[in-house]
Image (cartoon, rainbow, N blue to C red):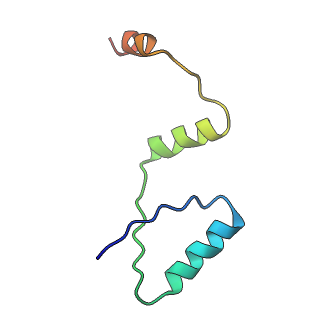
């Protein structure tokens, strides 16, 4: 049986829990890599540099 757990590692407790899980012999950690563009976009959102756009405006930008 496999279980997937998602941990937001921004808190000290979450980091400690993550390190503990990695130390267990029966736990296999598979970290997913994000591509550079996605990482940069996520950082912009966290830093408040993102803008909200309506769906119709977004569609206009695509065409």
1 versus 49 height, above or below = below
Q: Which residue is at a point 46% across and 46% down the rendered structure image? A: 36
Quadrant that contains the C terminus: top left
Residue that extends furthest to the right in the rendered view of this protein: 12
x and y percent of residue 57 in the render?
45, 11
x and y percent of residue 40 in the render?
53, 41
| Front-lying residue, 17 or 46 | 17
Horizontal side of 2 relative to 21 (left or right) equals left
| Front-lying residue, 36 or 57 | 57
x and y percent of residue 8 in the render?
57, 58
Residue that extends furthest to the bottom in the rendered view of this protein: 25
Quadrant that contains the N terminus: bottom left
Q: Quadrant of residue 45?
A: top right
43 versus 55 height, above or below = below
45 versus 19 height, above or below = above
| Front-lying residue, 26 or 50 | 26
Q: Which residue is at a point 46% across and 42% down the rendered structure image? A: 38
Q: Which residue is at a point 51% across and 17% down the rendered structure image? A: 53
């Amino acid at each position: 049986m496999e279980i997937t757990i998602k941990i937001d590692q921004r808190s000290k407790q979450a980091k400690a829990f993550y390190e503990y899980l990695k130390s267990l012999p029966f736990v296999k950690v598979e970290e997913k890599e994000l591509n550079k563009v996605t990482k940069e976009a996520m950082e912009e959102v966290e830093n408040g540099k993102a803008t909200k756009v309506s769906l119709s405006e977004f569609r206009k930008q695509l065409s």
